[in-house]
Image (tube, rainbow, N blue to C red):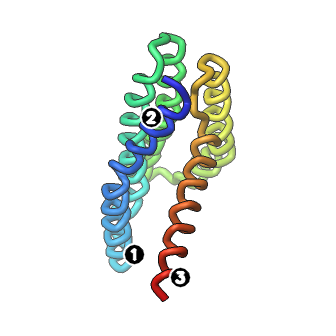
Amino acid sequence: MDKAERLQRIEQFEKRFNRLNIIVSAVMLGVSLYFLSTWSPYSILLPGVALLYATWLEWKKMRLQQSFNESTRYHRLLRMDFTVMLISLMWFVILIGMHFNGIDILPWMSWTLLIGGPCLILIPRWIDRKKSALDEHHVTSGEWTRANRERLKHTLDDFSRKGRKES
């Protein structure tokens, strides 16, 4: 499967979950506004729910990408990329458990942001580079971003042309 086919399959994947992303975002916004108005201690769970949803989407995307290449090394890199996301979810659950047990999590959050933040950016980029070296048709996140930007640009250009023709 070449790069163009993969880009098309990823685009179909994104379109399939686009409506669900909007619904989940609206529900999260509504629930967060409710928790902000009531000052509920459960408001700390909202980022965890969002992270759980993002982890589920990442799982679905990993399953899609596994169909692109049959190599076990490629699959291992895909699982490693998903594991980074899963570890961040588990760490968040641990922090929530500490919070509800009365432990001050501010120092833990500071260390998490200081150490985990750069790791959550650099490790997936390194894995993406490894996948690119292993599979010549691998669509990197940067390539997908550029293709998506071009597609949206053409959509907006078509939309503005239609608006000018009608007026």
Q: Which amino acid is tagged 2? A: Leu
Say which amino acid is labelled 3.
Arg
Q: Position of residue 19 (x, y in %)?
A: 32, 58
The residue wearing badge 3 is 164
Question: Front-most of 26 and 9?
Answer: 9
The image quarter containing residue 129 is top right
The residue lying at 54 percent from left, 59 percent from top is: 152
* Circle 1: element type: helix
Please name the residue that numbered disc 2 is placed on: 86
- Give amino acid for label 1: Leu
- Contact flag, marks 1 and 3 (Cβ < 8 Å): no
Taking the view exactly as shown, the residue that stands out farthest to the bottom is 167
Q: Nearer the viewer, residue 33 or 112?
A: 33
User: Could you tell me which residue is drawn at 51 percent across and 63 percent down?
Assistant: 155
The answer to whether one can see residue 97 in this image is no
Residue carrying label 1: 36
Which circle's residue, 1 or 3, is located before the other in the chain?
Answer: 1
- Residue 16 vertical position relative to residue 27 in the rendered view, above or below: above
Evaluate if marks 3 and 2 touch, with contact meaning CB atoms under 8 Å apart. Answer: no
Q: What is the C-alpha distance between the residues marked 3 and 2?
A: 48 Å
Q: Which mark is residue 107?
A: none
Sooner in the amino-acid sequence: mark 1 or mark 2: 1
Q: Residue at x 36, y 62 (%)?
A: 22
* Residue 119: image location, x then y, percent: 65, 37
Assess disc 1: are there few (<14), some (14-19) or many (≥20) residues with their C-alpha within 10 Å of its C-alpha: few
Q: Which callout, 1 or 3, points to the residue nearer the camera? A: 3
Quarter of the rendering containing residue 131: top right
